[in-house]
Amino acid sequence: MSFVPADAGYAQRVRESFARQGAMRTLGATLEAVSPGHVVVVLRHKPELSQQHDFMHAGMLTAALDSACGYAAFSLMPADASVLSVEFKVNLLAPAQGPWLRCDARVLKAGRTISVVEARALQHESGGPEKLVATMTATMMTVQGRPDVRG
């Protein structure tokens, strides 16, 4: 699908907002790509983010997928808008072991108030093929006119 962003400065706005996220900074997640309706967030597997079997904890992976979905939707919103998650569903398909996980989110339907986004978490193993480890379907809300909720 091809989308036209409502704000010509969408990429900078997305990057600046992502940089303010303490949660993503704590996880060590990085914003690797931004285009209209599409965002890639990369997360490195490390012991601090693992569960008892040394797999990436589902909550950590879900947080990265949620941010990727939110910013994919945010990339299409007006300059004065912000984004909040309304709901999401995660399918954990395989243990996430890393060493890198790429959360690739794409808008399926961009609405004036509600957008639906789909994301996939792909594991990158050294020298091996990508492996799909999780999916997310999320509903994101465009928020406007609230000074307490900004970009």
Image (cartoon, rainbow, N blue to C red):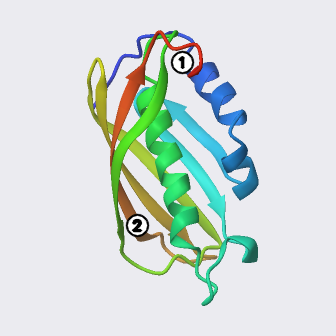
Earlier sequence position, callout 1 versus callout 2 = 1
- Determine whether, in the image, residue 104 is placed left or right of residue 24: left
Q: Position of residue 68 (x, y in %)?
A: 50, 44
- Give the residue number, with chain letter if any, for mark 2: 134
| Residue type pointed to by label 1 | Tyr
Q: Give the image quarter of residue 6.
A: top left
Q: Quadrant of the N terminus?
A: top left
Helix, strand, or loop for circle 2?
Answer: strand
User: Relative to the observer, which residue lies in front, 85 or 116?
Assistant: 85
* Residue 1 falls left or right of residue 76: left
Badge 2 crowding class, 10 Å Cα cut-off, few under 14, some 14 to 19, many 20 or more, is many
Tag 1 residue: 10
Q: Is residue 76 above or below residue 1?
A: above
Please state the horizontal and vertical placement of residue 137, each as a whole percent of the image: 31, 51
Q: Nearer the viewer, residue 122 or 64?
A: 64
> What residue is drawn where x is 57% and y is 73%?
57
- Residue at the image point whose x is 47% and y is 48% from the top: 66
Which amino acid, mark 2?
Answer: Ala
Mark 1 secondary-structure assignment: helix
How much space separates mark 1 and mark 2, taking CA atoms? 27 Å
Q: Badge 1, how many Cα within 10 Å: few under 14, some, many 20+?
A: many
Q: Which residue is pictured at 72% across the width and 44% down the height?
A: 22
Residue 44, compared with residue 74, is above or below; it is: below
Residue 148, how many percent across, how many down?
59, 20
x%, y% of residue 97?
Answer: 58, 79
